[in-house]
Amino acid sequence: MSRTALARRYRPRSFADVATQQHVSETLRRAVASDRVGHAYLFCGPRGVGKTTLARVLAMALNCQTRTEAGEPCGVCESCERIWSGNTSLDVIEIDAASNRGVDDARQLRERAMYAPSEDGRHKIYIVDEAHMLTREAWNTLLKIIEEPPPRVIFIFATTEPQKIEQTASPILSRCQRFDFRRVGMADIALRLREVLTAEGAEATDDALRAIARKADGGMRDALSITDQVLSLAGGAVTRESVAGILGMVPDDRYLELFDLLSGRNHAGIFRFVGELLDEGYDLVEFYHGLMEAMRVVLRLRLAGEEVPELSDDVRSDWETRAERFAPGDLLRMLALGSELEVTGSIRRSAQPRVLLELLLLRMSHLERTVELESLIRALGEDPRASKPPRGGAGSAAAATETGRPPPHRDVSKTRPTRGAEEGSSKTTPSPRAGVARGAEASEAEPESGSAPASRLPEAASAPSVAEAWTALLSDRAHLPEGLGPFLRAGRVEETPEGLLLQLPAGPGLDRLRDASVRKRLEAALGKHLGRSLPLAIEEMGAGAGSAGGRIDQGTVREDRLRDLLEREPTLGAAVEELDLEILD
């Protein structure tokens, strides 16, 4: 008894039946309908995506006596049946270039092409499969006839490696119309498999079809061949278990168990886990590919939530539970570690893939986890958002109650104070303190008991710090010297006993600020925002520390970033000293 395989029995008979390749099939159909068919075609693409099938459909359409006006072949006449089944036809010749690749084979093909088709109105079509296997000499033999073929002779070259043809016979590419075939999507493969199984009277679960489509890797022929195998094993029902048994796939429970080991940092359990995989007969290379897909799914769950169609509803909750144990950055680094084996191909070539897999899993389990800065500060006992109490209002009153000091008085009225108030104010004259970088507020002494609060000028009550005045100046472009904004943003200003010190990196900005007129203008603008006039000195950044010419390198940039962090979050200094932290890019 002879039986036709599913991949051959359900091969498309028309342009419309070819899945995913509409950009090719529609172009060829319109070319047939409008009589604009070329004399040479080059079909490029992965295996099993329909290159040879479309070549046969084109041959059927050109030689079909009853084709439609739209250019579709009938698919049932004697000519279509012979071409579709691949049987001997006088006018359609299929050649395997892998076994007919020499000069003599090319010369014989050129001589046969000189003969006219068997009947008037028909075309002679040569379908050369695996065309990249032809030698350079064979291409040179065919070059002239491909450029100027006899009437009604068409060449169709199919290949999975067009780059080899470009290297061996680049003049051929300019003499052919090239079509690049795409991989068939998983949804299209699953839909086609559902149609085939319905026609065969078999049932299949969605999980099983997705597993077959994923294993086929974009090839419809491979998907139909796998389905044929599964039907032989399972009979009339295609399930996830039967597909896993045929393909040797590792069940999802194993990957969930591995995620438990990685999240719990069970380093010793890695060796037991890999040993159990080998005892159960699983291929470690297949497990590795499944692991990369599982980590990709977990990462998508962390980033996209519900938008993961690969998971069914009955297992989604288990995967979501494992995904919550890892930060997206950790999963990304794990995927990067795993991809190194795929890039180098070492796990395929190694005689001991077990050692490579155990090493990979141990590196993942030892991988340091990502910790957010806010979480680290909270772990040290202080909330960074509560480290800076708001000015004025209820927050200031509450702070004053806890410290025993009254809140600062911010009277902005213009009335003269009473004599008693003047006496009280003379006894409680404030003594402001100078701040460095982010400077502190001016200190205020508490008034005597029973005396009225003294009126203060708004400038003294809300005098900005040096850092605040510098930030305001950088935003005030009208008062900045022209062209110095980008250079000043890289600088750092602080208050010294002599006045203000501005440190800038070496460059054009520093040279220009050494001009007395420019420095005076900047000094006046800064004094306007500071509320008081202080002399401004300019210094090259790093010159005081003895650095080589104040040059900026990776180390100084990292130190500046850490210094800026400490200025914005003072509580971070304790964490840096206690845990010996450093900035990592």
Image: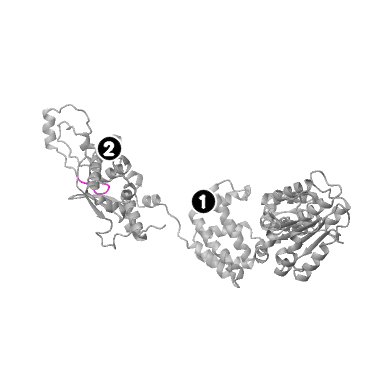
- Per the picture, the main secondary structure of the magenta-coloured stretch is loop
Query: Which x, y percent locates residue 260?
Result: 54, 58
Q: Is residue 517 visible?
A: yes
Q: Which residue is mark 2?
A: 396
Q: Which residue is mark 1?
A: 324
Q: Quadrant of residue 98?
A: bottom right
CB-based contact (under 8 Å), mark 1 and mark 2: no
Is 486 a magenta residue? Answer: no
Q: Is residue 163 left or right of residue 83?
A: left
Query: Which x, y percent locates residue 459?
Result: 22, 36
Q: Residue at x 29, y 63 (%)?
A: 548
Query: Which x, y percent locates residue 524?
Result: 23, 42
Which of disc 2 and disc 1 is earlier in sequence? 1
- Find numbered disc 1 in the image and state the secondary structure of the residue it sits on: loop
Cα distance between the residues tagged 1 and 2: 41 Å
Query: Which x, y percent locates residue 282?
Result: 64, 65
Q: Is residue 448 above or below residue 261?
A: above
Q: Quadrant of the C terminus?
A: bottom left
Q: Is residue 534 left or right of residue 277?
A: left
Task: Looking at the picture, tell me which residue is in the foreground, 207 or 469.
Answer: 469
Task: Looking at the picture, tell me which residue is in the foreground, 383 or 432.
Answer: 432
Q: Quadrant of the N terminus?
A: bottom right
Q: Residue at x 35, y 60 (%)?
A: 553
Task: Specify the amino acid type for callout 2.
Answer: Ser
Question: Which residues, given as a range, are shown in magenta?
Answer: 433-438
Q: Residue at x 66, y 55 (%)?
A: 214
Mark 1: few/some/many CA within 10 Å (<14, 14-19, 20+): few
Task: Specify the amino acid type for callout 1.
Answer: Glu
Q: Quadrant of residue 117?
A: bottom right
Residue 84: mark: none
Q: Is residue 490 left or right of residue 73?
A: left
Task: Looking at the picture, tell me which residue is in the foreground, 549 or 580.
Answer: 549
